[in-house]
Amino acid sequence: MPLKSHSEPVAGEKGLVRALGVVGLAAGIVNITIGGGIFRLPAEVSGTLGAAAPLGYLVCAVAMAIIVLCIADAGSRVSLTGGPYAYVETAFGPFVGYLAGVVLWLLSTFAMAAVSTVFADNAGALLPVFALPIGRTLFFVLLFGFFGLVNVRGVSQGARLNNVATVAKILPLLLLAIVGWVGVRAENLVVTSWPDAPTLARTAIILTFAFSGIESALVPGGEVRDPSRTVPRSIFLAMGGITILYLLLQTVSRGILGDALSTATTAPLAEAAGAAMGSWARTLLLVGASVSMFGHAGGMMLALSRVLFALARDGFLPRQVAAVHPTYRTPHVAIMLQAAAATVLAATNTFERLAILANISVLLLYGACCVASWQLRRTGVQQGGTPFRVPAPTILPWLGVLVIAWMFTSIKPLEWVAILGALSVASLLYLATRSRRGVLRVPDAP
């Protein structure tokens, strides 16, 4: 049977409002990408690569640039809600698309809950009531309940909140990246040894946690204005700025603290700011970290609830999950379901347990998006106007696959067993819902 056509809007998408523009979508990408990772990873990367740490960021940035070009191409061709799930489903059919959607939701929900546990730790240090088991659970209920209600009232409100949170957390980071140079010592930046390829590959995978997020921020595709122009412009505006900021933060922090950066695992950027500018700067960075994680939760709530909406729209979940609020025109059931899932995961797990498979899963998803970009271009799919023009379009997707395969060479066997087990369970769910999808199927285009 030929692949289902998506050249026309899916019926369930007609109730959604296209309210996200370039700035709103770019802010969403920045807000989700700069979550909790950059506030912790400089210490770990410095411990592995020393003064050569910027090389790890550059390798990861080059890999992400290749992948982002493919995602931008796919995103400019497919305007459905669901982001990478919709891209892969349109390119390869419902089963492969479904697996991409499951991986997207799982990895992002785990990351959302993981960052929120760190946020709860910070809150517990400031207000001891949140350090108690009951108080910690209450913290998650309040956090996710708040963002659930904000997003139910409209995608524009969620986007505006993302914009405010993005500015509030970027300013302290910019302060360290620019003013922190007054405390940099040149000898701390001297590279005494260069890393080998396996070490660099493992570090690049670790840094993927700090760069990932675009796959979640692009999920509300059915609510983006003029996607063929908005999606690529937002991606490059956000990712270019993020790469420059990360390089500056790593270099400045290493220049200030030297080898001591690798031992400042709790709050390396705050320690660097305090050493260079005083206790007020340390406090400001700690507050910025809390704002960042607050904004991360908001951005994830906006994006991941739309994955549930998309899965229900296509019959993989009960159709009630795809309901659109009659007044606010938002997928309110999916939003509140996402809030509940994140609350339970965060309240019952640790950061390490939640984050262990996130990076592997996101690289699998990125690989699928690279191949989907090639397939969508080959079959001439374009739903949102003139597609984004990608350089070397027949080579770039496969270059992205090769880069991801290289990064996978450092994955441990037990990590592969865990992710393949999750995909096997998802496949069984696909078979179990086959009869319901037969009833809900959108007819193939003539």
Image: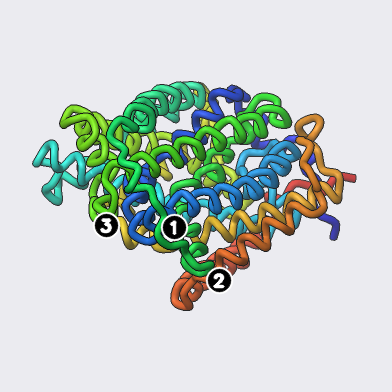
Mark 1 secondary-structure assignment:
helix
Q: In the rendered structure, which amino acid carries the disc numbered 2?
A: Thr
Nearer the observer: mark 1 or 3; the answer is 1
Mark number, residue 390: none
Residue 338: x, y in percent?
42, 44
Viewer-closest of 315 and 292: 292
Quadrant in which residue 310 is drawn: top right
Q: Quadrant of the C terminus?
A: top right
- Identify the residue shown where x is 39% and y is 44%: 250
Colour setting: rainbow
Q: Which residue is mark 3?
A: 348
Question: What residue sits right under mark 2 in the picture?
Answer: 409
Could you give the CA–CA distance between mark 2 and mark 3, rounded to whole angstroms?
A: 32 Å
Q: Is residue 176 rendered to the left or right of residue 99?
A: left
Which residue lies at the image location 20% right of the left edge and 35% below the top edge?
274
Relative depth, front residue between 11 and 356? 356
The x, y position of residue 94, in whole percent, is 70, 56
In this view, the mark in front (2 or 3): 2
Rendering quarter of residue 276:
top left
For label 1, the residue is 206
**Amino acid at pointer 1:** Ile
> How far is disc 1 from disc 2 in space, using C-alphas?
13 Å
